[in-house]
Amino acid sequence: MYKVKDAFFKKAKKEGYLARSVYKLQEINKRYRIFKKGDKVLDLGASPGSWLQYIAKMIGSQGKVLGIDINPIKWSQTPPYVHFWQRDVLKWDCEEAKTLSPFFDVVVSDMAPLTTGIKDVDAYRSFKLAERALDIALKLLRAKGHFVCKVLEGGEMKDFLLKCKRYFSFVKVFKPEGSRRESREVFIVGLNRK
Ligand SMILES: C[S@@+](CC[C@H](N)C(=O)[O-])C[C@H]1O[C@@H](n2cnc3c(N)ncnc32)[C@H](O)[C@@H]1O
């Protein structure tokens, strides 16, 4: 168990990424080809910044990525096409994002609540964040845009999946190898917004 953690942690350090979570997004992108050069991407729950680093590489300087988090990122010298705003998504008026780009090609969310250790409470809070991420995605994504969202498996996941299926042509639940085995986190991948 800890071997896996150490391997990804060390790899991230060696490759200059701010967190091991980057390998989950990399795996998702390799499987589902989420990003392309020039994309406009919204990254919800972006701190400390490893997904931002990876997305920036994938979209290149013709693209744009906006990270949102309650906490600041640890990437000090972001290139001009990487933006970060410190916001609480549960209170954020996401129309503000349109000042940066009128629409987004991809919305990703790696948001996680502060955990209590009480399974149902944690799953419920995670579901609330995922629901908010979906609401934001539906407001900002272009037609055929993609959505990737972390959620903890729990009672509400089934409803969340059904909702995603209403809005995306292809929906899958994906558990990356980079996720700790004991963790109940999974990623919902929604391709091609209807
Ligand atoms: C697992 S971390 C994200 C790691 C990030 N993807 C990376 O690669 O560096 C989860 C993040 O969700 C953020 N978060 C939780 N609730 C939030 C909220 N209501 N609004 C904005 N961000 C939130 C936390 O502050 C935390 O930084």
Image: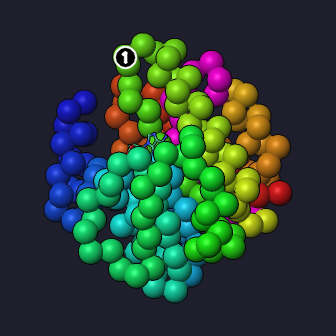
Asked if residue 23 lies left or right of residue 133, the reply is: left
Q: Is mark 1 within 8 Å of ligand 1?
A: no
Question: Residue 148: within the magenta?
Answer: yes
Q: Nearer the viewer, residue 175 or 45?
A: 45
Q: Residue at x 63, y 41 (%)?
A: 132
Image spot of residue 168 (x, y percent): 77, 51
**Pointer 1: what residue?**
117
Q: Is residue 178 visible?
A: yes
Q: Residue at x 44, y 32 (%)?
A: 113
Image spot of residue 140 (x, y percent): 69, 61
Q: Quadrant of the C terminus?
A: bottom right
Image spot of residue 44 (x, y percent): 50, 52
Q: Nearer the viewer, residue 120 or 28?
A: 120
User: From the viewer's perspective, is residue 124 above or below residue 90?
Assistant: above
Q: Quadrant of the N terminus?
A: top left
User: From the viewer's perspective, is residue 63 above or below residue 97?
Assistant: below
Q: Nearer the viewer, residue 47 or 152?
A: 47
User: From the viewer's perspective, is residue 113 above or below residue 7?
Assistant: above
Asked if residue 118 lies left or right of residue 157, the reply is: left
Image spot of residue 41 (x, y percent): 56, 67
Magenta-colored span: 144-157
Q: Main secondary structure of the magenta part?
A: strand
Q: Is residue 149 visible?
A: no
User: From the viewer's perspective, is residue 34 above or below residue 185?
Assistant: below
Classify 10 Å Cα crowding around label 1: few (below 14), some (14-19), many (20 and above). Answer: few
Q: Residue at x 44, y 37 (%)?
A: 112
Q: Amino acid at mark 1?
A: Gly
Dot 1 lies on which element? loop
Question: Residue 75: within the magenta?
Answer: no
Q: Quadrant of ligand 1?
A: top left
